[in-house]
Image (tube, rainbow, N blue to C red):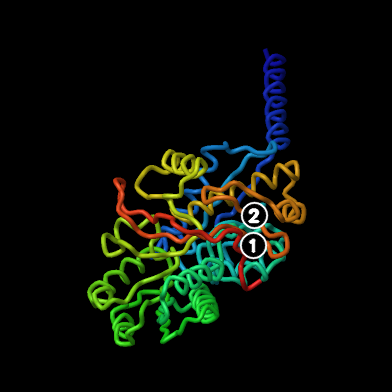
Amino acid sequence: MQFQSLIKRAMIGAAMLGAAGTLQAQGVVKLGLVAEFSGPFAQYGQQILGGMKAYMKQHGDTVAGKKIEIVQKDTTGPAPDVAKRLAQELVTRDNVDFLVGFGLTPNALAVAPVATEAKKPMIIMNAATSIITTKSPYIVRVSMTLPQITQPMAQWAAKNGIKKVYTVVADYGPGLDAEAAFTKAFKAAGGEMVGSVHTPLQNPDFAPFVQRVKDAKPEAVFLFLPAGEQGIAFMKSYKERGLADAGIKLIATGDITDDGVLDAMGDPTLGLVTSFHYSASHNSPENMAFKKAYAEANGTTLRPNFMAAAGYDGMAAIYEALRKTNGSTDGDKIMAALKGMKLSSPRGAIMIDPETRDVVQTVYIRKVEKTGGGLYNMEFDKFPDQKDPGK
């Protein structure tokens, strides 16, 4: 009886060792997701993670023999010190293979040195200040830069009879980038800038800024604000202060008419012209499949927006890179696999520029229209193969 018990224990031990060996052979690739999941920017993290989940819903959680695992961390908002600490913990304690996410520029910039020191690929899924990819050789961006999407807006405005513009931008990296890019391109096309104002990144009261614009009597106001609640607040002030009634057009980057909050912004957005790289209304099989997978993975409370699309494309890039390296997570091998990569995205064809590690993509000119399914940004013009003009 005792002998049989010993044999049984030995067999169980061998089975456990075999299972452990199989698990070790299969391996796990850990993605350390650093993003905003609480506070006024909470939808940033939700949309990015939602897009990542949509990709895994479509393509499974295994690639090149490795199981993909997401380790989620909340920065709570624009908090560089918190973002850096979380990234360090992910690298040293959680042993992640990639750092991903980054809704806001200050957080991405703070984590760049961590990626460099640890030689961990860092996939930017939103943060849009031009300089970010220059801060570490391990950074790749699959989202956009503000100059990239702003320059076409300036060119389109000048071509369509707008001659005098006032700029309103959020007072941080992306806003300043957008203003500089718009001003340069608009002046080059013969336009005149008649004023500018920078609004606080957190909790701005737009009423006095909007009144200042109205008093300057421009033909149009160019707007950049971080996506989400601020757009709703600005549109309310724009309507209450009577800018549209005064004949002052509003043109903007697509952050202002973020697909996720467009219905909540309501009819004041109708006719608003924006430039952007993704719209939920984009007509392609890839976008239809993405939206279906997003709803299956996350429910239908949120309409997927540009951050969700970037989360999805970030996962596509990671999966393709792992296929190219046969599952190796060596930082230098992954970066070599990412450079020059081409993907069929829900937004259209994209490429990772091998020199700058930034995304090359089509920028669309869109107008807010009411459809049977609600308010949507409907594309009507496009600027193909746009690089970041600052690089």
In x, y percent, where is residue 326? 75, 41
Task: Identify which residue is drawn at 61% across, 71% down.
Answer: 389
In x, y percent, where is residue 306? 47, 56
Residue type, label 2: Met
Q: Quadrant of residue 123?
A: bottom right
Q: In this rendering, is residue 22 above or below 374?
A: above
Q: Nearer the viewer, residue 136 or 265?
A: 265
Which numbered circle lies on residue 358?
A: 1
Task: Identify which residue is drawn at 45% across, 67% down.
Answer: 253
Q: Secondary structure at mark 2?
A: strand
| Position of residue 243 in the picture relative to residue 176 (left or right) | left
Q: Secondary structure at mark 1?
A: loop
Disc 1 residue crowd, few under 14, some 14–19, many 20+, Cα 10 Å:
many
Residue type, label 1: Asp
Task: Identify which residue is drawn at 40% across, 54% down.
Answer: 378
Task: Identify which residue is drawn at 69% across, 47% down.
Answer: 321
Q: Report the residue marked by disc 2.
A: 351
Which numbered circle lies on residue 376?
A: none
In x, y percent, where is residue 141? 61, 60
| Mark 2 vs mark 1, CA separation in Å | 8 Å
For the C terminus, the image quarter is bottom right
